Amino acid sequence: MTESFEMKDLYSQDSQGPNDSDSNETTFTVDGTLSLWSWTTAILITTLAAVFTLFPQLQLFLSQTVPASSTEYRTSLTPLESFLSTHFGLWLMALAASLVLNIPMASPPVARRVTNPEHPVLMPFTITALFGAFLSYNTRSVGSLASVYFFVTGVSGIWGLWALVFGGAPYLSKKTGADKRTSAFIFGNKSATSQQKKRQREGQKKP
């Protein structure tokens, strides 16, 4: 007596289950804890940055220990302390801004950020670097330290500004095919979008 058995493909049944219709759907959920932590940390860091940049007397009050005599009390920061305190406060503000700007959103990211992504701290760090370079360039009380700081932050800031303006995928014009971010201003760039459109209009006017 011969018996036949039919083996069922369990894998194919699982792959065609009720969850197959949801396989291509992506759900974006955001935990409120992360958003709350980002805002709270940013506020605390901003408060600390304000102490370093705007309230030097409060720094002296918090940092002083009980002196042996009242003549040892300090009334102002040294030039080096003031320089380091100011720029440290600026970078703390940049860190706080980065936390706020990168809080996760409930909606999916827009297409532009997928095709042309940017570093999450590029904008706040570039602004801080340029402002720090400007301040250090006008500082004469700390010697060559200001020049070194000006060079480092200046290079970082100018490079970051270039990345903000020209970095990423080009925005091509549908009519000319040129990058829309180019311009003929100052240097007379003949490949700029405006120049190519001008040549096209002149060519159309000719008989």
Image (cartoon, rainbow, N blue to C red):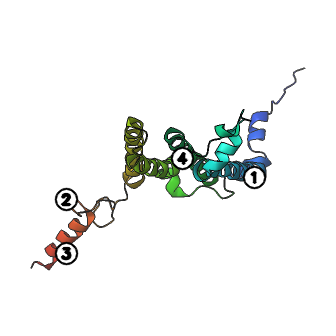
Instruction: Answer with mark 2 or mark 3, whichever residue precedes in sequence.
Output: 2
Left or right: residue 205 compared with residue 122: left
Reading the image, the residue beneath label 3 is: 201
Q: CA distance from mark 2 to mark 4?
A: 38 Å
Q: Is residue 191 above or below residue 13?
A: below
- Left or right of 128? Residue 13 is right
Tell me which label, 2 or 4, sits earlier in the chain: 4
Residue under circle 4?
A: 86
Question: Gap between marks 2 and 1, in whole Å?
Answer: 49 Å
Question: Along the horizontal axis of the image, is 124 left or right of 168?
Answer: right
Q: Which mark is residue 36?
A: 1
Crowd tier of the residue under label 1, counting other residues whose Cα lies within 10 Å: few below 14, some 14–19, many 20 or above: few
- Rate crowding at label 2 as few (under 14), some (14 to 19) or many (20 or more) other CA atoms within 10 Å: few
For discs 2 and 4, the disc positioned in front in the rendered view: 4
Identify which amino acid the numbered label 2 is placed on. Answer: Phe
Q: Residue furthest top?
A: 1
CA separation in Å, label 4 and label 1:
28 Å
Identify the residue at horizontal 64%, vertical 53% (top origin).
Answer: 100
| Residue 149 vs residue 144, the one in the foreground | 144
Closer to the observer: label 3 or label 1? 1
- The answer to which of marks 2 and 1 sits earlier in the sequence is 1
For residue 187, the mark is 2
